[in-house]
Structure formats: C-alpha cells, structure tokens
Image: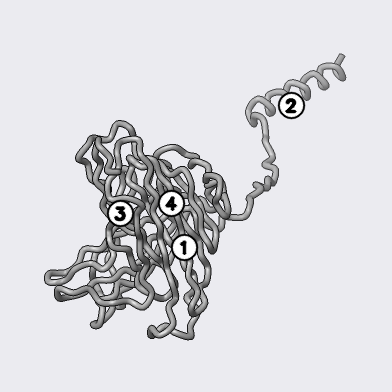
C-alpha cells in the first residue's frame, strides 16, 4: 500500500509540473525560396504607356514587305536623347514631354541637353519639347510605339530665326490627291535618300526608323517599303530601315481609307518623322488634303 501511495504521489507531482510549465515548442529552421529579381521594373498598371485603343493592331495588307503582327516585344521602353539648339549648343534645362492616350509625363534636360524616360509601358506616344523664347522647334509630335524597342534614341532640335536649317537627310512626303470624298482612298508616298554630295556623303546612316501616325479618321489598309520591315499598331506605321548606304534610298507607300462619317470641308493633315542614330529627328513638311463631297475628276 505504501508503495502504491508513493507511486501515486510521484504521478501527481509530475502532472502538477506539466500543468505549470505548459507545452514547449522547439523552433525549426526554415528556408524561403527566392527567384532572381527581374531585369527591368514593371511599370505600374494604368500608368504612362498603357496601351491606347485596341490592343491588337490591324494586319498589314497584301503587298507589304513584312508583317510583324504588331505584338509588343518589350513590356517597357527607355526613351532618351539630346535637345540640340541648331548651330549653337545642346540645350540645358529645357522641358521635354512624353504623352499618350490620357497621360503625359515630363523631364528636364541636364547641363548637357540630355533627357531620359525610363521603363515606359506599351502604346503610342508623342515626344515634344518646349522651346525657349525666340526659338522654334525643328521636331514636333514625334510618334513612337513604346514596346517596339527596348531603347529609343530620339534627338530633338530647335532653332532661332525665321528659316529652319537645312539638314543632310530629309524625308519627303507626297499624296495621291489634294481632295478626297468621305469613304475615299488616299495613298501617301514617303521617301528618304542618303544623297551623295551632302556633308554625310561617304557615311552610312544608321539606326534609321520612319514613323507616321495617321489621323484617327484614316484607316491604313496597305503599306509597302523597298527597304526594311514594317509594323502597324493602330494608326501608327513604324518602318524599321536599319542602315542606308551613301546613295541608297527607301520608298514607303501607305494606302488609307477616309472614314465615311468625316465631315465635308474637313482637312486631313499628315506628317512623317525620320529618326536616326546620332542626328536630330527630321520631319516631312505637313501634307494637307481637303475632304469634299464632290470629288474632282
């Protein structure tokens, strides 16, 4: 009996100690798996560069040299360049604006006239500068598709005085007619030549790109180019030419249909931009076409 009483007392003491101490947890080492960081940051949803309009561009019509399908190659693009006051210097402390469908953002050039927009999203955008008093822009509304390239070099120009400077390689644009009825068709021809005899003679022109943002009431149906590749993204044509040797030229044609609901007496204005490495972006003279209900023979 005494032995059982002793065992009983020991059991009660152990139970009492367990109740006082409570449960004991031993922490175990854990490892959290981490993937490599992304190479480039993702732009915030709905921020600058959100795709405007329809997400997929129309097909390039029959007769085109290439059809890229219009799918973005990069989820964000860097846009940078220098603002050049022609015949004077690179322009410091000058606002440069990048804008798109419902958004805009601005940078100011540094002491060397350099600006940069980093990791913008996908979509059509326009580059503009604000010239200082007494100056005029050489380049306005330069259209590019963010996402087409990872990096764009777009040098912008301005000048003083009344006469714009003559640049080595200048694009030209012509149109099939000076008037068109609603629902009619227009054909634009863009030409660029690396002409011998200019200061650029004997040098290749590199990283050549031509862009043409057609007015919203024009629908492109066919584009062709004698050199390079083409992409249509909504109403923006991008012709990636690459290089032009001395004496070499490129011809691009754009066939577009005028909207049926456009008002007669409207004026259609179109202009293309030539972007090429190490040089000021050059634009064609704006071409205007009148919309008339009675088309001339």
Q: Nearer the viewer, residue 62 or 237?
A: 62
Q: Which badge, 1 or 2, comes first in the chain's sequence?
A: 2
Q: Nearer the viewer, mark 1 or mark 2?
A: 1
Near mark 2 (Cα within 10 A), the count class, few <14, some 14-19 or many ≥20, is: few
Q: Which mark is residue 254?
A: 4
**Alpha-carbon distance for marks 2 and 4?**
93 Å
Q: Which mark is residue 14?
A: 2
The C terminus sits in image quarter: top left
Q: Which badge, 3 or 4, comes first in the chain's sequence?
A: 3
Q: Which badge, 2 or 4, comes first in the chain's sequence?
A: 2
**Alpha-carbon distance for marks 2 and 3?**
74 Å
Q: Are marks 3 and 1 in contact (CB under 8 Å)?
A: no
Tell me which residue sits at (50%, 40%) in the image: 56
Q: Nearer the viewer, mark 2 or mark 4?
A: 4
Identify the residue position indicated by label 3 in the image.
105
Q: Is residue 177 above or below residue 2?
A: below
Near mark 4 (Cα within 10 A), the count class, few <14, some 14-19 or many ≥20, is: many
Q: What element does badge 4 sit on?
A: strand
Identify the residue position indicated by label 1 in the image.
251
**Alpha-carbon distance for marks 3 and 1?**
34 Å
**Alpha-carbon distance for marks 3 and 4?**
31 Å
Tell me which residue sits at (23%, 35%) in the image: 263
**Alpha-carbon distance for marks 4 and 1?**
10 Å
Q: Is residue 161 above or below residue 35?
A: below
């Amino acid at each position: 009996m005494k032995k059982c009483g002793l065992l009983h007392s020991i059991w009660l003491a152990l139970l009492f100690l367990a109740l006082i101490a409570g449960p004991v947890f031993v922490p175990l080492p854990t490892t959290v798996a981490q993937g490599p960081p992304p190479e480039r940051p993702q732009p915030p949803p709905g921020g600058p560069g959100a795709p405007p309009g329809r997400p997929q561009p129309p097909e390039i019509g029959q007769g085109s040299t290439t059809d890229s399908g219009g799918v973005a190659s990069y989820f964000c693009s860097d846009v940078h360049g220098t603002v050049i006051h022609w015949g004077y210097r690179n322009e410091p402390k000058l606002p440069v604006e990048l804008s798109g469908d419902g958004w805009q953002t601005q940078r100011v050039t540094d002491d060397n006239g350099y600006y940069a927009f980093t990791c913008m999203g996908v979509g059509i955008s326009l580059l503009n500068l604000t010239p200082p008093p007494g100056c005029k822009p050489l380049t306005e509304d330069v259209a590019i598709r963010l996402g087409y390239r990872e990096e764009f070099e777009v040098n912008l120009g301005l000048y003083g005085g009344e006469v714009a400077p003559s640049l080595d390689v200048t694009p030209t644009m012509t149109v099939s007619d000076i008037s068109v009825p609603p629902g009619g068709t227009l054909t634009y021809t863009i030409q660029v030549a690396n002409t011998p005899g200019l200061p650029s003679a004997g040098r290749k022109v590199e990283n050549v790109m031509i862009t043409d943002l057609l007015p919203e009431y024009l629908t492109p149906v066919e584009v062709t180019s004698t050199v390079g590749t083409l992409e249509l993204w909504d109403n923006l044509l991008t012709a990636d030419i690459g290089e032009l040797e001395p004496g070499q030229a490129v011809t691009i044609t754009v066939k577009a249909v005028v909207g049926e609901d456009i008002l007669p007496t409207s004026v259609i204005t179109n202009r293309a931009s030539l972007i090429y490495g190490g040089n000021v972006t050059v634009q064609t003279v704006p071409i205007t076409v009148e919309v008339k209900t009675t088309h001339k023979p």
